[in-house]
Image: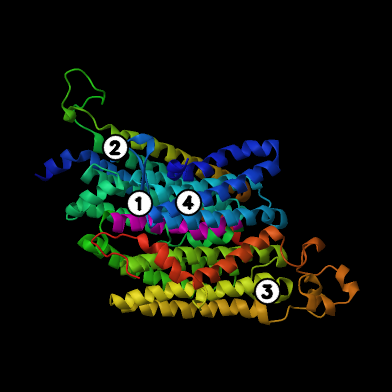
Amino acid sequence: MMEHLPVLLVIVPLATALISPFLSLLSRRLSLTVIQCAFLLNFIQSLLALQRVLSQGDWHYWLGGWNPPYGIEFVLDGVSAPFAVVATGIAFLVSLYAQPFFRKDPTEREPRSLFYVLFLLMATGVTGVCVAGDVFTMYVFLEITSLSAYGLVALGGNRAVFAGFRYLILGTVGATFYLVGVGFLFAATGSLNIADLAALIPNLTNSPVVIFGLVLILVGMGVKSALVPLHFWLPDAHTQGPTPAIAYLATAMLKVFSYAMFRFLFTIFGGYTNELASRALEILGWLAAVSVIYGSVMAIAQTDFRRMLAYSTIAQVAYIPLAMAIGTPFAIAAALLQVLSHSMTKCLLFMLKGAMHVKMHTTMIGKLRGMGRIMPICTAALFIAAMSMIGLPPASGFFVKWQIVTEAAGTGKYVFIVVMILSGLLNAVYFFRVLENAMFLPPEGEAESHGSSCRDDAEEAAQVSPHVESSVVPGDPAPGFRGELPILMLAPIIILAVLIIVAGVGSGWILDNVLNHISLPGGGAYYG
Amino acid sequence: MTQDLFFSHLIYWVLGIMFVVGFFGMMLHKNLIKKLMSMSILQTAVILFFLMLGYHPEGITPILQAGQTDPTTYVNPLPQALMLTAIVVNLSTTGVALTLMILLRRKWGTLDENEIIRRMGK
């Protein structure tokens, strides 16, 4: 079994996606249990794969025993294995959260089984992109990811269908550009295997065919990863879609496209050892810098927490191309750390957004007053997430920024330092507004009854007289839902909040022991 | 000379025009069905482009035949195999798009983009 792990990483969610609708005909419970187990299994698999990559180096798996460049190859290396761990881990936590979410949230009545099938397919696509060893297989997995994403966004209701359709149109344009780009590279080299292309391409970068191919691929991936001039589909899609879906879409799934960019720019084109790739990286770095600032500024202008998160996603995802533009192995490690850190933070924030939906029926920032009384644990988690987004130690976001700033200083790219610091300040502006409302301002009409809705907060409960207990509180759903969230929703939130701190404190260990297998072309071995 | 360049690459010019027509159709049409049709044109252009990469004048089917040992006499089968997969991807995209369009039409009663936005704003 162990030697087939790379392919099993993809097969487990795929097979579960196909089986689960039939299982749910027999029993809903059984089907949900199988789905949860599949996500957990997938996570364990990726951990095992990472462990093997760390101990034995890159893992090449030939499908059907056909040797590359003729056969299809799956590759796990120092970049893709950690990426797969983050993606599957987030998927597992989101699947835990989604189960009670669809039961509790009065506004989202879409069938859960449909959500899970699409979600499993999306997880298949994401792990598939991680392991894909040739650019066409990568295209297929990218499209599996995107197609299920369109469906998932559209599950969010009537407005979401329109957002999903727009996303589909722009996503397809991106995918088509990518495919044409692959066609150009194929025309120039006659190969699709990444390792083979890496050997052939660097000698051909004067050819207009190759240049055009690279540009098309980068534009295609730029559309899909919402880099600034091509970002306009993201805010609507990420505002309207159902919360658990977006918790994965905005985190692991969105970064897959940056990962594809990394594969082309570094693995195939040779990064800064190649003149063409260096120019592309420089342009990419500037676009990423603009994205960071634009996303943060637009996030400040939003009054809806959901839209604020969507714009902040644009800013945070752009950290990855920004770190890539710095281009040292340590910066790539920082980009991977950002994948981990931002996936956890944004996933946590979207889960909290879902909690607001369920408990307070609103996501408008101005109406979050008193959240600290209703959901003290969630508000504490919100505080930790905000710390990570702003970049305050000991949350993991700080260490990402620190790493990127250090590397930017080391390579003389001082503009990126300014961008990083500015981004932290802008994040502080919009998150303090949320925190002020959620933590410090008393709830509206507090005197009558709001305190009673807080089961966990003994202090509050003591102040409330018994007769208030029975009155229905405005802004508080049916009486059964008072107090904190159900345990299955709360557990992923607490786990993520703790992990953000753990990953922050342990970031040195992660960089030294997990992300030290990044090999870039032209030497540049990892230095710690 | 220019005539030569044009006619020897005629198919690529046609494909380029198809690509541009499809792309701008997707971006500029306000009718969602026309957007979808443009998407099909765009995707077809890409499929034909790939098939052209494997095309070989007077090439034969890539099956080993007696006396045909020269690889250059065969059509390259790889792009064709790739495009079978790409056609499946395009088919699923079209399927998802049509499903979404049915939902849109049921809810908003129109497939005009501006009209939907206007009705959503109400």
Residue position marked by numbered label 3 in the rendering: A367
Distance from Cα at disc 1 to Cα at disc 2:
20 Å
Residue position marked by numbered label 1 in the rendering: A58
Give the secondary structure at mark 4: helix
**Measured from the top left, where is residue B77 in percent x and y?**
28, 32
Q: Please tell me whether the stretch drawn in magenta is mainly helix, strand or loop.
A: helix
Distance from Cα at disc 2 to Cα at disc 3:
59 Å
Q: Is residue A138 left or right of residue B120?
A: left
Farthest residue toward the front?
A55
* Chain letter, disc 2 residue: A
Is residue A495 depicted above or below A373 in this figure?
A: above
Is residue B34 at least partly visible in the picture?
Answer: no
Marks 2 and 4, the one that precedes in the sequence: 4
Is A423 included in the stretch rendered in magenta?
no
- Residue A474, by quadrant, is bottom right
Do badges 2 and 4 share one subunit? yes
Marks 1 and 2, the one that precedes in the sequence: 1
Marks 2 and 3, the one that precedes in the sequence: 2
Q: Nearer the viewer, mark 1 or mark 3?
A: 1
Distance from Cα at disc 1 to Cα at disc 3:
51 Å
Q: Nearer the viewer, mark 3 or mark 4?
A: 4
Task: Identify residue type, mark 3.
Answer: Lys
Residue position marked by numbered label 2 in the rendering: A70
Distance from Cα at disc 2 to Cα at disc 4:
28 Å
